[in-house]
Amino acid sequence: MTIEVKPSTADVLLAVARSAGTTARLLARRRLTMPSSLVGAQLRDVDGSCSTVFRETVAARRATDPVLLVVAFRLRWVGAARWAHAVFRRTCVVNTPLFAGFPGFASKLWLADRSTDVYRGLYVWDGAARATAYAVRLSQVLRLVTVAGSVAYEVVEGAERAEFLSGRRTLPAAPPR
């Protein structure tokens, strides 16, 4: 049984501020990129629905103990409005400082499932403890803008991103509606 300790709001704000500073340094040094080669790739989840990559973010640092982190959520106030989802997908790049500067971040695939209105992040992280620490903090931030109960995450050890891209592995199920 894992007991998850909820960080204080001050801890979350401090962690996000540090991440923003580190992200700014990564950008200034051109050590954070957004390749487009995987945009449009589709990944299946265990329920058979499909999430499409709409952006990728990569830090120029290698994970020595790589783990995958899958985060999923549904946005509040967006519902089924296609135009609102399109606006979110175009503008969510401004959220990059919320994750790219956290210790252990290596890469993120930004995913959208149009059939379920679920957004996912498939991250490569250096170390399960770092991935979990980030996910706990991110969950608190996401709960401000998501449908109640729709934020979920899973740390996947011993897997590679290529397994999800090739269809050998499936993403965890979408959070309940």
Image (cartoon, helix red, strand yellow):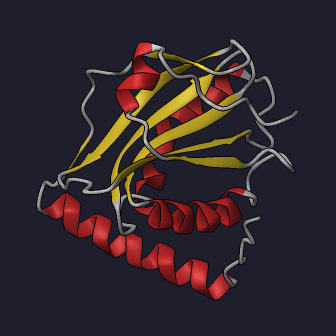
How far across and down, in percent of the image, does residue 136 sit? Answer: 63, 65
- The answer to whether 109 appears left or right of 139 in the picture is left
Determine if residue 138 is in view: yes
- Left or right, residue 9 beside residue 157: right
The answer to whether 163 is drawn above or below residue 154 in the figure is above
- Up-down relation of residue 110 to residue 83 (above or below): below
Q: Looking at the figure, which quarter contains the C terminus? A: top right
**82 with respect to 20 (left or right):** right
Instruction: Give the left or right position of residue 7, taking residue 103 as reference.
Output: right
- Residue at 41% of width from left, 54% of height from top? 96
Measuring from the top left, give residue 175's x and y in whole percent: 78, 36
Q: Nearer the viewer, residue 7 or 33?
A: 7
- Viewer-side residue, 159 vs 123: 159
Position of 69 relative to 42 (above/below) = below
Judge by depth and name the residue closer to the eye, 60 or 90.
Answer: 60
Which quadrant is the N terminus positioned in? bottom right
For the question of whether residue 40 can be seen, the reply is no
Residue 17 in which image quadrant: bottom left
- Rendering quarter of residue 5: bottom right
Question: What percent of the width, then of the height, locates residue 3?
Answer: 75, 72
Q: Residue at x 87, y 50 (%)?
A: 148
Whole-percent x, y for residue 23 in the image? 30, 64
Answer above or below: position of 48 versus 171: above
Name the outermost residue toward the left.
Answer: 29
Query: Count of labels shown?
Result: 0
Determine the residue positioned at 27% across, 38% down. 34
| Of the pair 43 and 88, the residue shown nearer to us | 43
**Which of the 4 image quarters holds residue 37?**
top left
